[in-house]
């Protein structure tokens, strides 16, 4: 019965995405008297009680030191300093902290006064995540809601796994219908070092909420229309579907190659780097093309991924699509530039001379080469008037 109950518990825990529910790390270390007041008998409990006051946005709080094992005045100064400078919530939200103590028989009554640099609403909005996966989910939710600020606390921060701008770009690549603008992300960390950090993101969309909503609607509508354009309603295989989508995209948009900054090696991102640029504005870089085709394939029920690599030594993007169980390269931007023959549904071997990428980061495209039946060219038959 115990095994069955354990299995049932595991099954019940599976389901939709949710963040790891991390209670404040100090909860288990809070001591209270019978009346509910905060008490402490050692340094760890004293520090945890002060952290609790900060988390509650208390401007002033009392702590009873009962049977305290330590130097009261010295420990109070140290605890206030550590909470303000080293604890994530303190480094994020506390401007200044002071204290006073009064000895009552063998015990002490301590008063902590706290001045904040953040509002109670800002302190309460901090989301606790367990690591990079939950962090990514929180960023995704913020982008879905077009929020301009996101603040999370994690016990496992590392710069490479919490790279905010890369996280935003990867999320948009995986959710191309979010590619209606090029958000710029700035990041602040509290404290400045350590594993436990609060990460504060500022997301600049470059436009107000009404324009964002309008652009999102325009992108979704254009993607739906282009997915259906030229669809006869008859059942076709994925190869023909991808061919039709690429042709529709190339007819809709003009390709503008990326240009890297000569000094930084970076590119200046704008509207042309988005699916909106390709499908609505009618001009896009290779990244905009890759995002647009990914959006069309998602609506057309075709598996599709975005590849980052190099073309002619310049940063370049294209797609991998799955056809008949195998992956194939599709470079819609170069199809628009040079025609589809060389860049539509190609294997690694077929396309490797023109495009370069980290093969370890993407599935191999090593299926059988795909060829299409020759298309019939309409025969021109002059009318009687033209004959005359």
Image (tube, rainbow, N blue to C red):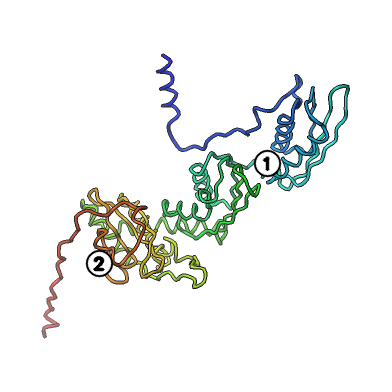
Q: Is residue 212 above or below residue 115?
A: below
Disc 2 or disc 1, which is closer to the eye?
1
273 with respect to 367 (left or right): right
- Residue drawn 28% across and 66% down? 353
- Residue drawn 88% across and 30% down? 102
Q: CA distance from mark 2 to mark 1?
A: 57 Å
Q: How busy is the neighbourhood of tag 1: few (under 14 within 10 Å), some, or many (20 plus)? A: some
Pick the front one: 212 or 141: 141
- Residue drawn 84% across and 27% down? 108
Provide the residue designation for mark 2: 342
The image shows residue 382 at horizontal and vertical percentages of 13, 79
The image shows residue 97 at horizontal and vertical percentages of 79, 42
Q: Secondary structure at mark 2?
A: helix
Residue placed furthest toward the bottom: 388
Q: How busy is the neighbourhood of tag 2: few (under 14 within 10 Å), some, or many (20 plus)? A: some
The image shows residue 221 at horizontal and vertical percentages of 40, 57
Pick the front one: 97 or 300: 97
The image shows residue 360 at horizontal and vertical percentages of 35, 53
Point out which mark residue 87 bears.
Answer: 1
């Amino acid at each position: 019965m115990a095994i069955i109950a354990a299995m049932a518990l595991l099954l019940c825990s599976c389901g939709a995405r949710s963040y790891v529910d991390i209670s404040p790390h100090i909860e288990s270390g809070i001591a209270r008297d019978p009346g509910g007041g905060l008490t402490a008998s050692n340094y760890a409990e004293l520090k945890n009680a002060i952290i609790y006051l900060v988390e509650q946005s208390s401007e002033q709080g009392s702590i009873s030191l009962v049977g305290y094992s330590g130097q009261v005045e010295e420990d109070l100064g140290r605890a206030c300093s550590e909470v303000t400078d080293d604890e994530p919530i303190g480094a994020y939200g506390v401007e200044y902290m002071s204290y006073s103590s009064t000895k009552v028989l063998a015990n002490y009554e301590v008063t902590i006064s706290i001045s904040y640099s953040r509002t109670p609403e800002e302190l309460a909005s901090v989301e606790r995540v367990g690591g990079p996966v939950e962090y990514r989910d929180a960023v995704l939710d913020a982008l879905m809601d077009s929020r301009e600020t996101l603040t999370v606390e994690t016990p496992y921060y590392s710069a490479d796994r919490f790279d905010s701008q890369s996280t935003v770009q990867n999320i948009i690549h995986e959710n191309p219908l979010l590619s209606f603008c090029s958000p710029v992300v700035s990041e602040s960390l509290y404290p400045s070092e350590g594993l436990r950090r609060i990460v504060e993101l500022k997301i600049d969309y470059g436009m107000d909420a009404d324009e964002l909503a309008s652009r999102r609607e325009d992108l979704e509508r254009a993607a739906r229309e282009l997915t259906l354009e030229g669809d006869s309603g008859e059942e076709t295989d994925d190869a023909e579907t991808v061919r039709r989508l690429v042709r529709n995209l190339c007819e809709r948009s003009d390709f503008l190659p990326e240009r890297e900054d000569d000094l930084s090696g970076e590119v200046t991102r704008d509207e042309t780097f988005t699916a909106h640029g390709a499908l609505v504005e009618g001009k896009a870089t290779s990244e905009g093309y890759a995002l647009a085709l990914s959006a069309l394939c998602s609506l057309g029920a075709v598996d599709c991924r975005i590849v980052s690599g190099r073309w002619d030594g310049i940063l370049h993007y294209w797609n991998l699509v799955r056809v008949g169980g195998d992956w194939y390269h599709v470079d819609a931007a170069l199809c628009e530039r040079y025609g589809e023959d060389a860049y539509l549904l190609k294997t690694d071997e077929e396309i490797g001379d023109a495009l370069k990428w980290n093969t370890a980061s993407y599935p191999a495209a090593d299926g059988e080469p795909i060829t299409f039946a020759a298309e019939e060219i309409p025969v021109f038959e002059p009318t009687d008037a033209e004959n005359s």
